[in-house]
Amino acid sequence: MKAARLVVLAGLLLSGLLPARIHAQQAVTFPSGTATGEGALYLPSTPGPHPALVLVHEWWGLNDWIKQEAAGYAAQGYVALAVDLYHGKVAQDPETAHELSRGLPQDQGVRDLVAGFRYLQSRKDVQPSRIGAVGWCMGGGYALQLAIAEPQLKAVAINYGALATDTAALEKIHAAVLGNFGGKDQGIPPDAVHAFQAAMQSIGKPVDAKIYPDAGHAFENPNNKMGYRAADAADALGRIDHFLATHLKQ
């Protein structure tokens, strides 16, 4: 999408034009170990097969903003699966979000994401070798963990998510990696980004990471009233669009 991605998408949603570019939106379930994974699936209007995306929500849960992003990617021609790591629970305040995120075992979250990836691979309308992932905040860290756990993932975009520096783990990544981070983010500071880049570089794996000097955490989310930065968000989301198109559509 263009730089004004968020404004344009919001206008399409309000006008009712965007659904015409999406064939279907549906709740789906899929096997996840001995349990069941859940998610919201958005399909392009054309039959495909299409590249696909696993979208990973923030610590708030699978809320309307993540669903809006999924709809936007479907409108761009991706089969978009927003995995619901909280299985229906959505936080309305930081205290509940903290409780939900702390209560999610990492191995369970990664298992659900890998299961979502494999669910996409099994669909006839998906190109199984062209699946990427995008995550924000908590979901950014989980998107990286998905790239470590699933070597067939083609591309991963990490937005201010927790980063790893263990080269034994990072060696498992075969996906192209892009990252967007805030220079004033106290949770994922620039030093953490540089350490991640250095670790990846030491094993010959490039990272396209950009730090926005005046941005804090969650600067891409318009619901973040104190920290949303429209210009930086448009640039970051535009970078993701270009990155995904390069690695999943060409």
Image: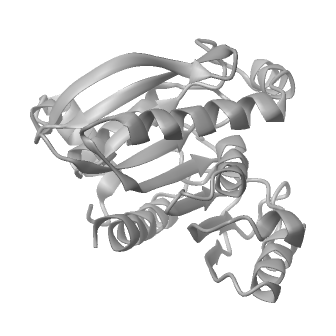
Closest to the observer, 230 or 149: 149
Q: Quadrant of residue 123?
A: top left
Classify the position of the C terminus by image quarter.
bottom left
Instruction: Left or right? Give the position of 218 relative to 222.
Output: right
Q: Is residue 165 visible?
A: no
Across and down, in percent, residue 11 comes to 21, 40
Q: Count how many numbered circles sit on residues in the image.
A: 0
Classify the position of the N terminus by image quarter.
bottom left
Q: Quadrant of residue 152?
A: bottom right
Please tell me which residue is depicted at 29% across the width and 66% down the height of the picture.
Answer: 249
Instruction: Left or right? Give the position of 121 relative to 101.
Output: left
Closest to the observer, 224 or 239: 239
Q: Is residue 32 visible?
A: yes
Q: Quadrant of residue 202?
A: bottom right
Q: Is residue 42 depicted above or below 133 in this figure? A: above
Closest to the observer, 138 or 15: 138
Across and down, in percent, residue 146 comes to 66, 49
Across and down, in percent, residue 193 comes to 78, 72
